[in-house]
Image (spheres, rainbow, N blue to C red):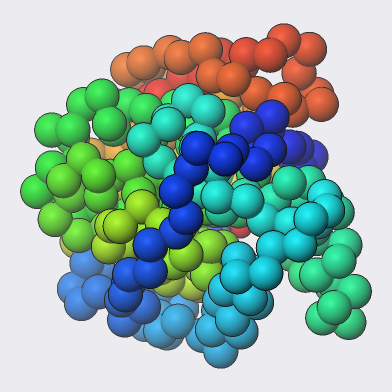
């Protein structure tokens, strides 16, 4: 597990307009990925679950009445991708603690409530090269806040699906897509044992942060690439990038306030399997 951190830009910004309500479909898209090795309910066609609906209710309540402490959500511009605004926690750890106390049970770490260097670089790359996503069916794997999915939608993707195993991330994608007035289908479930067919572009930001997870992620990325899809990964060098098999297509200095990093910027590579 990687440490959660808070970006400076999570501080309230009085210049930002409020969220504009928009209906974003939570109906899973038809025919983008056909789950071959697991029942469809675990694949990309999996319906939004009761847990994701409950999480969406929680996040909508938090957004409507954000409170004034460190445990609040704020709609802020993403530091390296100011075109995209996200509902992020003022302090993700404090927010997490309050939500767990409210729920009376453990909740997954709220990765979706922070911006991550790998996702920021990947979103920047898509917005700077819109032809990569334009008109294509895009899957944002392990989407967290949905930053990369939203960037793909802004770049003109035909259809964007954002997948994450955390029901709160599925809910966060929905509220963040609304805030940016784009359509993104948010889905839960673990796709990593599926074949990933039916995707034109697979994007995965900051997903190689844990050894066993990185091995599963890389196997899935390679399977999807073998179908002929374009695959892009954003990685800030967390130690699980393979030595070969990936070509660097961009290298960005991304602002970060991660405690583990001394510098205010972190070098992030965008890579493509070859
Ligand atoms: C560090 S966050 C990155 C989020 C986002 N991609 C970004 O760059 O902002 C990692 C995300 O991976 C998700 N995750 C972990 N294992 C996963 C899996 N097997 N399938 C889908 N998502 C997964 C976590 O829930 C978390 O939201």
* 218 sits to left or right of 128: right
Residue occupying the point 19% across, 55% down: 137
Q: Is residue 52 visible?
A: yes
Query: Residue pushed farthest front?
Result: 14
Judge whether 181 appears above or below 91 on screen: below
Q: Which residue is drawn at 40% across and 80% down?
A: 46
Residue sitting at 31 percent across and 81 percent down? 27
Number of marks drawn: 0
Residue lying furthest bottom: 50
Q: Where is residue 66 drawn, in percent x and y?
A: 69, 63
Question: Looking at the picture, how far across and down is residue 30, in whole percent?
Answer: 20, 77
Residue 208 located left or right of residue 1 = left
Is 51 or 12 nearer to us in this picture? Answer: 12
Residue 246 visible in this rendered orientation of the protein: no
- Quarter of the figure with the C terminus: top left
- Percent x, y of residue 208: 58, 38
Residue 148: x %, y % from top left: 40, 43
Q: Is residue 259 above or below residue 194?
A: above
Question: Would residue 31 be found to the left or right of residue 181 on screen?
Answer: left
Is 237 above or below relative to 13?
above
Q: Please name the residue shown 69% across and 50% down the image.
A: 89
Q: In which quarter of the image is residue 134?
A: top left
Viewer-closest of 45 and 51: 51
- Most foreground residue, 162 or 40: 162
Residue 132: quadrant of the picture: top left
């Amino acid at each position: 597990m990687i440490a959660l951190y808070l970006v400076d830009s999570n501080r309230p910004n009085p210049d930002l307009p409020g969220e504009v309500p928009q209906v974003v479909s939570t109906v899973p898209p038809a025919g983008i990925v056909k789950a071959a090795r697991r029942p469809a309910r675990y694949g990309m066609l999996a319906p939004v679950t009761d847990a994701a609906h409950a999480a969406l209710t929680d996040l909508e309540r938090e957004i409507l009445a954000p409170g004034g402490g460190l445990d609040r959500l704020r709609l802020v511009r993403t530091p390296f991708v100011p075109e995209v605004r996200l509902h992020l926690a003022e302090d993700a750890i404090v927010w997490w603690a309050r939500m767990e106390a409210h729920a009376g049970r453990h909740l997954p770490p709220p990765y979706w409530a922070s911006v991550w260097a790998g996702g920021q670089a990947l979103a920047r790359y898509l917005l700077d090269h819109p032809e990569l996503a334009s008109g294509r069916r895009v899957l944002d794997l392990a989407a967290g806040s949905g930053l990369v999915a939203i960037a793909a939608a802004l770049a003109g993707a035909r259809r964007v699906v954002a997948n994450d195993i955390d029901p709160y991330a599925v809910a966060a994608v929905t509220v963040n897509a609304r805030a940016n007035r784009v359509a993104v289908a948010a889905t839960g479930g673990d796709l990593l044992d599926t074949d990933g067919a039916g995707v034109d572009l697979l994007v995965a930001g900051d997903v190689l942060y844990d050894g066993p997870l990185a091995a599963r992620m890389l196997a899935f990325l390679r399977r999807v690439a073998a179908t002929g899809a374009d695959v892009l990964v954003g990685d800030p060098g967390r130690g699980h990038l393979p030595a070969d098999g990936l070509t660097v297509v961009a290298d960005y200095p991304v602002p970060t306030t991660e405690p583990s990093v001394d510098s205010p910027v972190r070098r992030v590579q965008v890579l493509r399997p070859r």
